[in-house]
Image: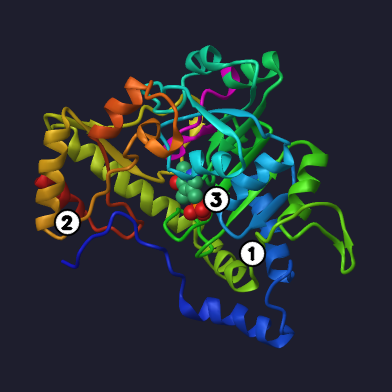
Amino acid sequence: MLPIQVTEPFLPDIKEYQALLAGIWERNWLTNQGPLVCELEKNLRIYLQVSSPVHCVANGGLGLQIILKALGVSGEVITTPFSYVATTSAPLWEGCSVIFADIDPLSLTIDPKAVEAAITRRTQAILATHVFGNPCDVEALAAIADKHGLALIYDAAHAFGVRYKGKSILEYGDASLVSTHATKLFHTVEGGFVVAKDTEVSEKVEWMRRFGHAGPEQFKGIGMNAKMSELHAAMGLSVMNHLPEILSGRRRVVEHYQSILDEKEGVSSAITLRDHCEWNYAYFPVVFDSEELLLRVMDRLKKNEIYARRYFYPSLDSLDFVGAPKNCPQSLSVSTRIACLPLNPNLKEEAIEKIVSCI
Ligand SMILES: *Cc1c(COP(=O)(O)O)cnc(C)c1O
């Protein structure tokens, strides 16, 4: 067996990609909101059934920064310590300060009670992550945001295709960011897209990502370069054709893991999915009884050329450069004991069994 990585980018048949490249060569149009980016945005909006326009960006990290800018968030942001570092670095990069609110240990998403307790006079926004595609408690967070006049932003980097109560998860909150990085379920090599509910904010996102251009010689305001190229959009369009097999393959792998992991002592499937959610099988995290056990298992997997990944680790409140108090015991506890097992739509049954046998 080849080494097994925690994630493996999905590549369509090279001919599908080449067919789209041929059009790019013919048009000689490589970037600046070309026809393939426009087509991808249109197709994503239809596929995901979102009511607001989809704005593609160069990557998820820049997408988060643009959302904060478009919503005018510059003060204090309450966010989760249990996420990828981008969720914290984006507001810091934008000059905001970050306050952490602990997570609920079952859903692994931010705990609304902790959010409410963390609000100060300076708080302007809540930035929450749909962890591993599991939706946040969107109703409780919306109620808190309304009551205190805060912007509600979702890092939906993991949540491609997730639905909650019959609607796309992207319909909740003021704005959401989906990453389409190569390691994500749906990808454009590098990339992402933003959806914002308010028309004015959505329009800002649209021009902010391309230097504020309103025309060749007109500018609407301060923008940056977060444009998606035609080559990236071509990859996205090619991968989109394979979404049914990507999703069903992942589902098969997750269900097989779950069925054989059931009898193991000291380790369990890590997330409790929220009710009324249609999940996307984006990750298969497992949580161990202790960090020591996790390290032993990771080591044994590595000896077999199987690479699980500690994700998310460390808990973001423990990063010194953030300068926030380390006040999230639930996140600290989970982050030291959790790892994602390899997951890709083509993972063979025997590989899954070998991985579980190492545990
Ligand atoms: C991948 C990821 C990002 C960053 O997305 P990029 O497209 O890689 O910039 C942000 N947040 C979370 C939770 C992620 O997993």
CA gap between label 2 and label 3 equals 36 Å
Decide: is 174 above or below 22. Answer: above
Numbered marks: total: 3
Query: Which one is closest to the eye, mark 3 or mark 1?
Result: 3
Q: Callout 2: 10 Å neighbours few (<14), some, many (20+)?
A: few
Where does label 2 land, which residue?
350
How many residues crowd around disc 3 within 10 Å: few (fewer than 14), some, or many (20 or more)? many
Residue at left 19%, top 68%? 2
Instruction: Residue 147: give x, y in percent of width and height.
Output: 69, 13
Residue 128 in percent (x, y) is at: 53, 31
**Residue drawn at (67%, 42%), measured in percent from left and top?**
67
* Magenta span includes 28: no
Pointer 1 local density, CA inside 10 Å: few below 14, some 14–19, many at least 20? many
Q: Please state which amino acid type lies under the numbered disc 1.
A: Met
Please determine whether, in this image, residue 65 is positioned above or below residue 25.
above
Disc 1 marks which residue?
228
Q: Are marks 2 and 3 in contact (CB under 8 Å)?
A: no
Distance from mark 3 CB to nearest ligand 1 atom below 8 Å: yes
Q: Secondary structure at mark 2?
A: helix
Q: Which residue is mark 3?
A: 61
The mark nearer the N terminus, 2 or 3, is: 3
Q: Write down the quadrant of residue 266 in the picture.
A: top left
Asked where in the image residue 240 lies, by quadrant, the reply is bottom right
Disc 1 element: loop
Residue range in magenta is 128-140
Which image quadrant: the C terminus?
Answer: top left
Whether 20 is drawn above or below 183: the answer is below
**Relative to 32, 95 lies left or right:** left
